Amino acid sequence: MKIRLKAPAGLNSTGIYGKDGKEMPVGHEMEVAEEPKGWAGRYDILSGDRKGKEAVTGSGDGDTKTASDVLALANDTSVPFMTFKSAATKLLGEKTPASKADIVAALEDLATQP
């Protein structure tokens, strides 16, 4: 499939680097064997098989966590607070509380909703 690199919303560069360590410019076209899902929002598909494929969306973190998954992060001492809060914010939105205890309570409430 052929893709063209673009700048993500609000930026003016691709943020994608080649083997030589130099950033690939906006507008750079290249052939790829499969859709580079880790580059979500940084390319347009110009040609190739799109049959049965979904549009690439999201943050690119690879998986969507449930409230129970995020609650498990709260109890994992190796996970920094801001990582936990970021995951919680994806579920709770802009109304995410500031303190860890309040976030845990909100997630527990979310996890018990049908």
Image (tube, rainbow, N blue to C red):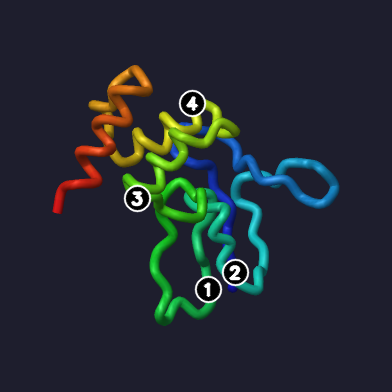
According to the picture, the residue beneath numbered tag 2 turns out to be 2
* Residue identified by numbered label 4: 82
For residue 47, the mark is 1
Among the two numbered marks 4 and 2 on one chain, the one whose residue lies closer to the N terminus: 2
How far, Cα to Cα, is label 3 from label 4? 17 Å
Mark 3, mark 1: which one is toward the viewer?
A: 3
Direction right: furthest residue: 20
The numbered mark, 2 or 1, whose residue comes first in the sequence reads 2
Q: CA distance from mark 3 to mark 2?
A: 34 Å
Instruction: Kindly check if marks 4 and 1 are in contact, taking CB atoms under 8 A apart as contact.
Output: no
Give the mark toward the camera: 4 or 2: 4
Identify the amino acid type marked 2.
Lys
What element does badge 3 sit on? loop
Quadrant of res 2: bottom right
In the image, residue 80 sits, relative to residue 2, either above or below, namely above
Tag shown at residue 66: 3
